[in-house]
Every structure is written in C-alpha cells, then in structure tokens.
Amino acid sequence: MKKVFIIILLFLFIASAIAYFFSFRFLEGMPQMMQLLLKTKHGSYVSIDEMNLYIPEAAIASQDRRYYSNSGIDVISTIRAIYFTLVTGERQGASTITEQLVKNVYFSDVDNLKTDILTKILAVVITTMYPKKTILEVYLNSIYYGKQNYGIGNASQYYFTTLPKDVTLAQSAYLLGLINAPSYLSAHKNEAIKTADLVIQEMLHNKYISQTQASQATNELNNFR
C-alpha cells in the first residue's frame, strides 16, 4: 500500500510540474480575466477589502480550514479520497477552496475523473502563482448562492438587501452555508438556517469568533425564520 501512495504522490508531483510549465502563459493575468468575466456575466465584483471579515472567515472555516497552509489541494484528504476510489471504485470529493474555484471557472459543465485530476493540478499551479487573498476573493465572487445569484455582492443584496461590507456574522454564515447545496438550501429556509448554524460552530471551533458572538449570531439566525 505504501508503494501505491508513493506512486500516486510522485505522479501528482510530476503532473504539477508539467502543468506549471505549460500553463504559465495560459494562467497569466487570470484574476483580471476572471474579474472581467464575472463583471460581464454576473454584474458585480467585490474586492475582499470591501467585504466584512466574517465572509472570508466563514468560507475558510466551513469549506477549507487549512486554506492558508495548503498548496491548493489538501494532501491528506486527497490521499484519503484516492484510496477510497481505489478500494471501492467510486469517486469521493476532496475539494479545497482553490479546487472549487478551478471547477467553477474551467470545468463547470464537466465532472469526471479526468477533470478531477486536472482540477488538482491547476489548483496547485494557481496557488504557486497568486496570493491566497486573491484566490479567495475571486472564489467568493464566482460561487453560486442559489436563486440565480452568483457572487457575494449579488447574494448579499438579494437575501439581505445590504452590501458585503455591512453583513452581520449571522448573515455571513447564512450566505456561505448556502454554497454547500445552493439550489436546495435557497428553497428551504429552515435547512439553510441549520446549515448556517453549523458554519457558526465551525467558526467558533476554528477560533474566528468567541462563544458570545456565536450565541448572538445563533439568536439572530432564529429571527430569519
């Protein structure tokens, strides 16, 4: 089994090196290109500096708690997912924030083993080329929040008629909770509230907020019903 893991890791390393060489020019200027795309397609693009800090914190706590320390992929989760696939023959997701971004931008209409591998390779490449802050900003502006709302700017206006810089902790948790199953949760408010409370608990567990803040946010969520 150790040999299998070594072969897999070696493959990922070599594939990443090759992808880096061939993808540099393709990915150069990617944030600017995606900003233009998102502005045209979704109508708004919000700088991360114009978001309440709760928004990126909720994203990291609920989607990718090792975001700032990983290389674009979570090696532990990836090895676990590969092992699961080898043993069962079924695919298992292990998506970091960067992987989700790659899928949203490049492979939104395709989902197979090949794109899974390409997603991981490009996630590593992107992480070596751009600051984590930039990647997170583009991610928050590209993901789907349900009800035809793409991007945090559109979502905060639609659900709470407010700007991303003015959302509360509870509202941030609600919005970032939606991305787990946007079509379903946006149509089932009680389930969305339960998911938002889980996001708050993850933020508490990862020490982004205090117990007092968590309790106050949970109380505010109850008023959403």
Image (cartoon, helix red, strand yellow):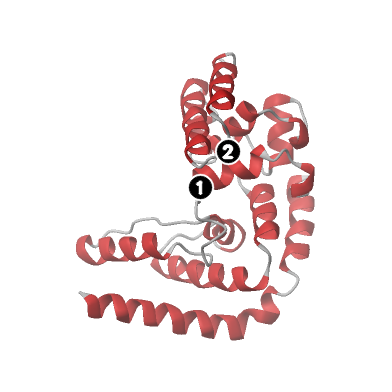
Image position, residue 3 (x, y; %): 24, 80
Please give the name of the residue rendered at 24% of the width and 67% of the height, measured from the top-left corner.
86
Q: Position of residue 70 (x, y in %)?
A: 51, 63
**Snapshot quadrant of residue 53:** top right
**Regarding mark 1 in the picture, which secondary structure is present there?**
helix
**Residue 90 in the image, given as x and y percentages of width and height:** 27, 59
Q: What residue would you read off at disc 1?
A: 63
Frontmost residue, 35 versus 124 = 124
In which quadrant of the rendered view does residue 168 lie? top right
The amino acid marked with disc number 1 is Gln
Q: Secondary structure at mark 2?
A: helix
**Is residue 134 shown above or below 155?**
below
The answer to whether mark 2 and mark 1 are in CB contact below 8 A is yes
* Residue 219 can be seen, yes or no: yes
Q: Looking at the picture, tell me which residue is in the foreground, 199 or 106.
A: 199
Q: Nearer the viewer, residue 149 or 199?
A: 199
In the displayed structure, 136 sits above or below 117; it is above
The answer to whether residue 46 of the structure is visible from this angle is: no
Quadrant location of residue 210? top right
- Residue, x 54% and y 56% (percent of image)? 67
Identify the image quadrant of the C terminus: top right
Taking 36 as reference, is 199 left or right?
Answer: left
Q: Which residue is mark 2?
A: 176
- CA neighbours of label 2 inside 10 A, class few (<14), some (14 to 19), many (20+): many
Mark 2 is on which residue type? Leu
| Rendered residue at 59%/36% (across/down) | 146
C-alpha gap between disc 2 and disc 1: 9 Å
User: In the image, 32: left or right of 171?
Assistant: right
